[in-house]
Amino acid sequence: MSSAVTLTLKETIDGRVVADAIAADRFATLSAAEIARLPIWLTRHSSPSALADATGGEADRATRGPDQQCVELGDLFSVRGERSAVLRVQGNLGNFDAIGTAMTGGTISIDGNAGRELGRAMAGGTIAVHGNVGDDAGLAMAGGALLVWGSAADRVGGALPGASRGMTGGEIFVRRDVGRDAGTAVRRGLIVVGGDTGDGTARGMIAGTVLVMGTATGSVGLWNKRGTVIALGGAAVPATYRYACTYRPPVLRVIFAYLRRAHGVPVDDRYINGRYARYCGDLSEVGKGELLLWTDS
Amino acid sequence: MAEQPATVHGVVIDDTFAEAFGMRAARVIITAATPRWARQAATTMTGFATSVIACKCEAAIERELLPRLTPDGRPGISVLVFATDSDGLQKRLVERIGQTVLTCPTTACFDGLPDATERMSVGKPLRIFGDGFQSSKVVAGRRYWRIPVMEGEFLIQEDFGRAKAIGGGNFLIQGETAEATLAAAESAVEAMTGIVGVILPFPGGIVRSGSKIGAKRYKTMIASTNDAFAPTLRPITTTQLAEGVNSVLEIVLDGLDFESIAGAMRIGITAACRPGIRRITAGNYGGKLGPHHFHLRKILSGDRSPEPPPSPVAAPPSAAPATGTAPAPASATTPAAIPATAPATTPATTAATTAATAPVPTPAPKPTT
């Protein structure tokens, strides 16, 4: 048993790679040889340039083809260590999708970018990415923590296609910006965005919390049922929300204290001690959700 | 092993022990916008909680908490609540928090035993005060209820931890005058204030009316005055007062574990041994009722290790310390468990047999006098 398993990408891969075999809890019982034999699916692309964009571009999507090939993990990575739930991955994995799928425990640390669907349906453990991640990070996530030190693309914490619920538990922290539709249909859990969010934040949110430390651009909280959207840098209040009061929500202090202590998130005192304008909504839904906007007053 | 002192600063330490009982405890963290309001809520919450005889629980402030030690980063107060059983503890918390913390401006309420595996639902039953407008948030795996109130919002954790604990640690300060005895007791309380894991549930931490089990004259009384330590009765009862003693005060301690209580007793007794004090003793029932024995001399020698539990005795499972004077109807008290009284000068094991703490076989429904 090793203290950690280290995977080092041998060379840059063309096309997208489905790497759902890379999950820390599964590595805990596998030898180095067994890890090296895990299946990895390659999809070749006619447009390799699209692969460089870790956040996943439209061009990349359009050229996806059926040319898939199964290879062994050892073909792409050098494997060091065995039987450990602590996994370190080195290399730019911007085109590696579905890392940490259904993970229930352990730790994955990625020294670089990660592709789409990072932590898909994960229920426990921690995935830390020291770079950017692609679309659908935390897709249908049910537990654990996803820590992204860079930016994330669209649909953070979203739902599987056709599913009525997005994220149902766990925590997602993105240090910088996120793309469109962050927190769509979230049922439970916490999404913290250190920068700005794109259009459609918390769309169809059922419950849970989305904290935007920058500006929530575009529409925010449409069809929100009981969820909480906190915007420290402001947001456009939808017409279907109504102003309630300006106060200091006690629960925010707990959230901020937790972020500071557990994750080292820098939260300025003015946000902790400040007052927030509360808007109830979405009144086109059940109306038990809220939009909390920090006020400088 | 360290030598066990017979005297401290010239004050005789009886070779006896305090006998204490198993209880269930919770720690409640109350925070507020200012230390004043946190203390106000805590003081109100722990009012009328001196003895399980009639108060149904024993509670007091454990210590003040700096903002960096509280879940929401505000000034806080830690309160310990003790009851004889788990269900009773949960009910008392719901009652008291609902009436005294929820109602107090700016407060929020958190569990202070997050690692306890036994959990009680406290915020959950209180949430319905929100009449359907309440909402919850899960932060770090813990659910908090947000109850809308006229001031804004009351925040309370959904469940609270429950721990096995000990109630009824005690020692008696025998002084030459009432003034000297009170001063010694105050000194002891001051020294013990803020010790983690321990509370002194009586007024100012001091009991002036220690009780014995049952009564000689009134069959319905579950506890009555501890005549063996009442100076005014010295010539007409079997006294246990040392010569020259004209006043006795008792310190009662509840704690989360044996070591905490023993440590606090050591500090308190040492502080109480000052001019004007003749003797320090403790209340027990001969060791037959309570499983936790705090030997004074052993504690003062620095040995805080608990004794192995005694063999099962006649004490009912619900037996619990019933400190103080609150009378209650007797149903199954066991006065026979009290050994015959001993001469006042007799040290050692029989010295404080009529203890200031008494077991409560069943919760007392109401006082009879």
Image: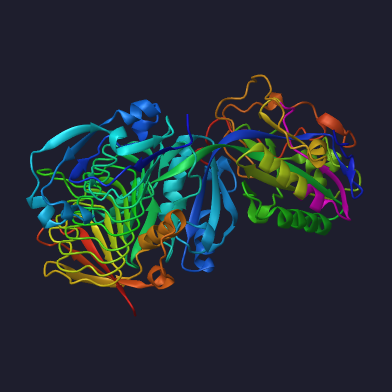
**In the image, residue B308 above or below residue A101:** above
Residue most extreme to the bottom: A297
Inspect the magenta stretch and tell me whether residue B41 lies in it: no
Q: In this view, does B173 lie to the left or right of B135?
A: right
On-image quarter of the N terminus of chain B = top right
Instruction: Residue B91: give x, y in percent of width and height.
Output: 43, 42
Residue A288's quadrant in the figure? bottom left
**Is any atom of residue A30 visible in this view?**
no
Residue placed most toward the observer, B24 or B92: B24
On-image quarter of the C terminus of chain B = top right
Inspect the magenta stretch and tell me whether residue B283 lies in it: yes
**In the image, residue A104 above or below residue A111:** above
Span colored in magenta: B268-287
Q: Is residue B33 left or right of residue A297?
A: right
Residue most extreme to the front: A11
**In the image, residue A29 above or below residue B25:** above
